[in-house]
Every structure is written in C-alpha cells, then in structure tokens.
Image: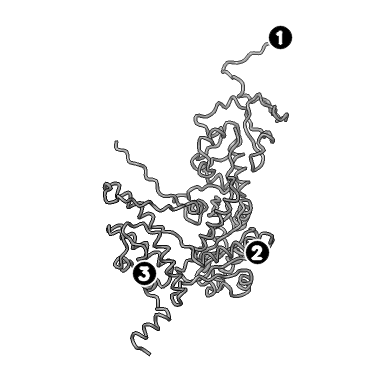
C-alpha cells in the first residue's frame, strides 16, 4: 500500500498569541549571501537560491523611522514613570491614517522591550513582558477579556463569565511580570455605543489591575469618539498621543529624509545587477506613487525586487515599479497641496 | 465541529515523581488561576472516580501541548499515564501527601503522590509521611482459601 506523507498544517499562532508573538520577536531575518557564481548553479540550486532570496524580500527590513524612534523613546520614559504608580498610570495612543506605520511602530516597540527584558533577565522562566491584542469589531467587555485570555493561552470554557476571565487574565499577567500592554485597532471602540463604552471601561479596569503601561493604536482615534464624553475625558487626561503621518516631500530636509528612507530600503536588496543609488534617484517618482506612505513604499520596492528575481533581470527598473499595483488609497489619493499647485502651474489653471 | 487546539499554559510547571494526575492538574490550575474543570476539559480527562485502580484517562498529546513537557517525561512522572500500566500492587493503594521539603521547588500547592508500601517516612528529612494499612490487593492473594490454624 502506498504511503503518503502526513500533511502538517501550519500552526494557528497569530501575532495575538504568546506563541506567535514570541516567534516573531525571536525571528531574526538574515540577508542571504549573494553567490557570485549564480549563473552557473544547477537548476535545483538556482531554485533554492532564488527561493531564499524571494523569502527574504517578502519580509524586508523595518526602517527605524523618526516615528518609531519617538514612540520607543516616549514609552521607555513612561515605563520608568509608571514603575511606582499604584493607579492612574500614564499611557500612549498612536494615531494616524491607514498605512502610515502605526502597527509597525507598536510591534517594533513591543519587540524592543521584550528583547531588552530578556537581556536583563537571562534566567529562563514564565516571563511574558509584552501583551499584544487587537480590539475585535463590535467589541464587548467579554470579547476584550477573552482576547487577553487567548493571547495567554488560558483554556476557558464557553460558560466562563467575564469576572472569571478578567480575574484569571489579571492574576496571570501579574505573575508573569507583564509591564507593557499593546492594544491595536483601538478605533473599533466606539464610545457612542453602549457596548463600546463598556469595552472602554473594561480596558480601564485592566489598566488599574495590571501594573503595566498601556499603549493604544488606531486610525484617527480623535475622530472615532475616543475622547468624547466623561470616559473620553479620562482617557484624554491619561494618554499622550503621537500622530503618524505620511512622509512629506516639500522642504529640502523632508526630501533628504525621504531619500534616506529609500536608500535604506535599497541597500537591503539582494539583487545581482542592481546598482546602488538607482532607487534614490527616483525618489520623487516613488513619492508620487506611494504618497509618502511607508507601507506603500515598502510594498512597491519589495514587489519590484520579487519581479526582478522572477524574470531574471536582477535589477529594479522603472517598468518593474510601474507594473506594481499599489493599494487603493495610494492609487486614488488626492494630490498633496504642493503637487496640486505644481499641476495648476503646469496647466495654467487659476 | 472540532474543538480549539490545546495551547500551552502561560505558567507551566513540571510534575513530580509518581504524582497523581489529579494533583498535577490542580497545581496547574492554581498556578494559572483557572478552574480545574477547564483544564480537565482541555485534556479530555475522564471523570474522577476517586477510587483505587480506577485511574483517570486523558489525552496525553493534549497534556503535552498544555504543559510543554514531552510525553515520555510526563509518563515517567505520572504513573497513571504509563502504558503498559505500572505494577500497581507494588504501590500503596491510596496516594499520600509528598514530603514538603522534597517537593519544595514544585509550585502550585500541595502534592499527592504514590508511595511504595514500605515507605512511611522521609529518611532524608526525618518526616513522618503517615500511613494506612496495606490494601488487600497489596498481598499475594490466591484463589485458594487461606486456613489459619491456631497455634
């Protein structure tokens, strides 16, 4: 009888579980070495070599942007300030448009903190210094508590009430030394609805019970009624905000920042015939395509690099960049005032 | 509908030697601030009959996933999980509390474990562990009637 190899599906370990989070934190993408004799590799070796490079370009480096630096610096300060606080701990809200790097900033912050805690505490033990959860759509207090429990891997029966879940989560997080809680997609909380207001209260209760610094992240939270009403005032009085914005391309310093960002991404490429500085020269074109969104820029360059490997040209050309279809927001975004002004000047419109 | 896969507990702890499954699950539940019945459901544990030789059955793979310890280590420590079954008649019928200084490093509360019939004290720590009369099954019982003659 023919035997077939057992299929082992990938583990269901998203970033919002301690296993997935830990694997992501420990993940250290090493750039593959470029083989100078790559045209002479056998087909099997060539396929493996290309596959390793494709895998690398699918998850290119994270650029340490000024926003990430500011977030890490602010939260490091908050972590120290909150050490002796028994209540009313200060927090941070990262707000901004879609694709401006909020989730990247918040996850990089968590990674940096977890690695620093591991460095200070080399002894093995059940230590979970960072919790990362997302607010589910139409969140209720119980759903939020279950999200925390799901991150920790606590087995909960469907009949468990919210008090049991909350108590278990808070007690375990105190035991494992959690001192940073990252809550993403906070814009799913709508304080105008009863469920949203109760979920906000649940988050506040967690912040009182767990001796940790809370960092929220969401799309334009000031417009999502998060600071409205009595509850909103309390949040506004305890949380500082950092806004993530698209990169600007007006003043010379802004152009220099953009060029440095493109050059950083370019030097991380692993292509054989790509000349350094090619993309930096096309900085304005890349800005027009991505509208200054770092997520769109990364997608554009990574996609072009993958195409360059697949078609064998081994260098990114304008045709590669033109062929990449970006997200709807970048493709249909209205021109920035400076672009509109240039367009008016070119067309002679008043 | 399939149940959710069992995931590792946030605060696992290893079992101690010859610990009973009930004691181990209770310690895990205490450390992780959950109910024992939730852990029992997570490892498909059979109902507790609380009777000698009515050992509990559970899914060893799920217990491995729940604790993060390999199956052979769990089987070595928890005699109820051994296959083939251990020679129960060598052990005293009912589990007793373990010597506290011996199991001090194991967290989660008191530990109950099996002891051989001859062990009634911890020689290392000079502690009396208590005893019960040997179970009827501890003696080599034969089908033939034992005649005890008066001297």
Q: Position of residue B116 (x, y in %)?
A: 63, 26
Chain to which the residue tagged by mark 1 belongs = B
Q: Residue A206: in sight, yes or no?
A: no
Q: Position of residue A262 (x, y in %)?
A: 41, 66
Q: Which is more toward the observer, B108 or B84?
A: B108
Q: How far apart are labels 2 and 3 at the CA level?
A: 47 Å
Q: Quick one: label 1, few (<14), some, or many (20+) residues within 10 Å?
A: few
Q: Which mark is residue A203?
A: none
- Which of discs 2 and 1 lies nearer the camera? The answer is 2
Q: Is residue A311 above or below residue B51?
A: below
- Which of discs 2 and 3 lies nearer the camera? The answer is 3
Q: Residue at image x 61%, y 21%?
A: B139
Q: Which mark is residue A281?
A: 3
- Which of discs 1 and 3 lies nearer the camera? The answer is 3
Q: Is residue B95 above or below residue B144?
A: below
Residue A287: which quarter of the image? bottom left
Q: How far apart are labels 1 and 3 at the CA level?
A: 112 Å
Q: Which mark is residue B151?
A: 1
Q: Quick one: label 3, few (<14), some, or many (20+) residues within 10 Å?
A: few
Q: Is residue B106 above or below residue A88?
A: above
Report the residue marked by disc 2: A89
Q: Position of residue A83 (x, y in %)?
A: 66, 59
Q: How far apart are labels 2 and 1 at the CA level?
A: 84 Å
Q: Residue at image x 57%, y 31%?
A: B53
Regarding mark 1 in the picture, which secondary structure is present there?
loop
């Amino acid at each position: 009888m023919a035997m077939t190899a057992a299929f082992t599906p990938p583990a269901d370990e998203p970033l919002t579980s301690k296993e997935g989070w830990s694997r992501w934190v420990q993940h250290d993408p090493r750039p593959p070495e470029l083989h100078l004799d790559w045209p002479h590799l056998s087909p099997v070796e060539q396929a493996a070599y290309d596959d390793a490079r494709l895998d690398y370009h699918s998850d290119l480096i994270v650029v340490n942007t000024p926003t990430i630096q500011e977030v890490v610096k602010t939260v490091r300060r908050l972590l120290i300030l909150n050490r002796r606080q028994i209540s009313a701990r200060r927090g941070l809200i990262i707000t901004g448009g879609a694709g401006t790097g909020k989730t990247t900033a918040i996850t990089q912050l968590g990674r940096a903190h977890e690695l620093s805690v591991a460095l200070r505490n080399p002894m093995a033990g059940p230590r979970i210094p960072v919790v990362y959860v997302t607010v589910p759509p139409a969140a209720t207090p119980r759903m939020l508590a279950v999200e925390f429990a799901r991150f920790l891997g606590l087995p909960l029966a469907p009949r468990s009430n919210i008090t049991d879940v909350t108590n278990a989560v808070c007690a375990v997080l105190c035991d494992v030394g959690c001192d940073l809680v990252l809550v993403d997609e906070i814009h799913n909380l709508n304080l105008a609805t009863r469920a949203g207001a109760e979920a906000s209260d649940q988050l506040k209760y967690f912040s009182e019970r767990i001796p940790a610094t809370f960092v929220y992240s969401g799309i334009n939270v000031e417009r999502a009624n998060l600071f409205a009403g009595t509850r909103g005032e309390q949040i506004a009085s305890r949380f500082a905000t950092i806004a993530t914005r698209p990169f600007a391309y007006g003043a010379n310093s802004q152009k220099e920042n953009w060029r440095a960002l493109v050059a950083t991404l370019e030097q991380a490429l692993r292509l054989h015939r790509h000349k350094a500085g090619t993309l930096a020269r096309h900085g304005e074109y890349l800005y027009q395509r991505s509208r200054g969104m770092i997520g769109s820029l990364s997608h554009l360059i990574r996609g072009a690099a993958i195409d360059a490997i697949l078609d064998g040209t081994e260098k990114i050309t304008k045709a590669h960049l033109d062929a990449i279809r970006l997200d709807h927001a970048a493709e249909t975004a209205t021109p920035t005032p400076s672009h509109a002004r240039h367009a008016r000047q070119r067309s002679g419109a008043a | 509908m399939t149940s959710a896969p069992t995931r590792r507990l946030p605060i696992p702890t290893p079992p101690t030697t010859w610990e009973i499954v009930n004691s181990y699950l209770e310690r895990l539940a205490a450390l992780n601030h959950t109910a024992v019945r939730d852990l029992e459901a997570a490892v498909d544990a059979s109902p507790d009959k609380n009777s000698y030789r009515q050992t509990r059955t559970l899914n060893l793979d799920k217990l491995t996933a729940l604790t993060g310890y390999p199956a052979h280590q769990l089987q070595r420590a928890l005699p109820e999980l051994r296959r083939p079954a251990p020679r129960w008649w060598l052990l005293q019928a009912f589990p007793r509390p373990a010597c506290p200084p011996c199991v001090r490093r194991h967290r989660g509360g008191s530990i109950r474990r099996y002891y051989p019939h001859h062990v009634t004290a911890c020689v290392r720590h000079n502690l009396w562990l208590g005893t019960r009369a040997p179970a009827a099954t501890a003696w080599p019982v034969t089908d033939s009637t034992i005649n005890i003659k008066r001297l």
